[in-house]
Image: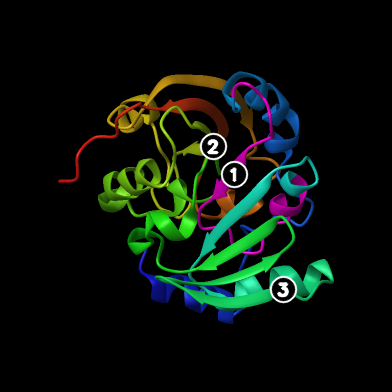
């Protein structure tokens, strides 16, 4: 989606995608994910990239488990809200291609994700994508995944949550071909779990959906990412 769409959503407070209590699928499956895809040997829990993070409380949940967390978000008000609602005062610095808000193990880079330099992000061992790929317009998915691969280390683990629905619109967009979509940059793609959430999400029924699955995927970044096109 165009950035103007998201600026409008945030300015109007229409952020129904924000989960106040954090994502249940993250809580249910993260430990199994880290056991299989985390750094080896497990000398540290690893650095986690959270693209298009908004003000997600998942950042705090991940940091509480020992991870250094790097979120990316182009709306500065979302980064400010995250730290304000966390009750802490972050350090704000200007870096190449981004403004960094940081407090202890959590950083949020305010930047255009698609233009973010690798040097600014640093070494990434794990990726947590709950509401990013499904928010990207279908015609930009390949570009998004290419950048995701570029910003992560070879063999980095990907924890991905997608949706499969029949409302015919988005965001969140329905993704029916996840393994094929990921194949240029990730392998070992596994469909870990799926959950029917239609009854719990009346807003999707209002948009005409008669089915709504939330799907959890694990994958691993290819040792050599596909070349830029």
- Give how far across and how far down residue 176 sits, in percent: 38, 31
- Give how far across and how far down residue 36 sits, in percent: 61, 19
Identify which residue is drawn at 32% across, 32% down: 185
What residue would you read off at disc 3?
90
Q: Are marks 3 and 2 in contact (CB under 8 Å)?
A: no
User: Marks 1/2: CA distance?
Assistant: 6 Å
Where 115 falls versus 63 (above or below)? Answer: below
Check disc 2: other Cα within 10 Å, few if <14, some if 14-19, many if 20+.
many
Point out the tag, 1 or 3, that comes first from the N-terminus: 1
What residue would you read off at disc 1?
48
- Helix, strand or loop at disc 1? strand
- In terms of depth relative to the viewer, which is nearer, 194 or 123? 123
Q: Main secondary structure of the magenta part?
A: loop
Point out the tag, 1 or 2, that comes first from the N-terminus: 1
Q: Which mark is residue 125?
A: 2
Asked if the magenta segment contains residue 126, the reply would be no
Q: Quadrant of residue 11?
A: bottom right
Q: Would you say 199 lies left or right of 184 here? A: right
């Amino acid at each position: 989606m165009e950035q103007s769409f998201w600026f409008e959503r945030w300015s109007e407070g229409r952020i129904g995608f924000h989960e106040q209590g954090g994502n249940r699928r993250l809580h249910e499956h993260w430990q199994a994910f880290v056991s299989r895809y985390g750094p080896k040997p497990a000398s540290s829990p690893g650095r986690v990239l959270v693209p298009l993070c908004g003000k997600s409380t998942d950042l705090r949940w991940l940091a509480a488990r020992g991870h250094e967390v790097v979120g990316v978000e182009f709306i500065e008000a979302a980064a400010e809200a995250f730290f304000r609602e966390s009750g802490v005062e972050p350090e704000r610095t200007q870096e190449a291609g981004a403004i960094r808000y940081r407090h202890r193990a959590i950083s949020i880079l305010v930047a255009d994700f698609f233009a973010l330099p690798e040097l600014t992000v640093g070494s990434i061992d794990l990726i947590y994508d709950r509401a990013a790929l499904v928010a990207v317009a279908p015609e930009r998915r390949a570009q998004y995944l290419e950048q995701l691969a570029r910003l992560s280390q070879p063999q980095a683990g990907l924890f991905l949550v997608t949706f499969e629905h029949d409302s015919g619109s988005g965001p969140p967009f329905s993704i029916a071909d996840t393994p094929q979509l990921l194949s240029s940059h990730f392998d070992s793609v596994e469909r870990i779990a799926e959950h029917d959430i239609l009854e719990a999400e009346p807003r999707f029924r209002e948009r005409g959906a008669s089915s709504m699955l939330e799907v959890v995927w694990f994958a691993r970044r290819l040792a050599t990412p596909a070349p830029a096109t």
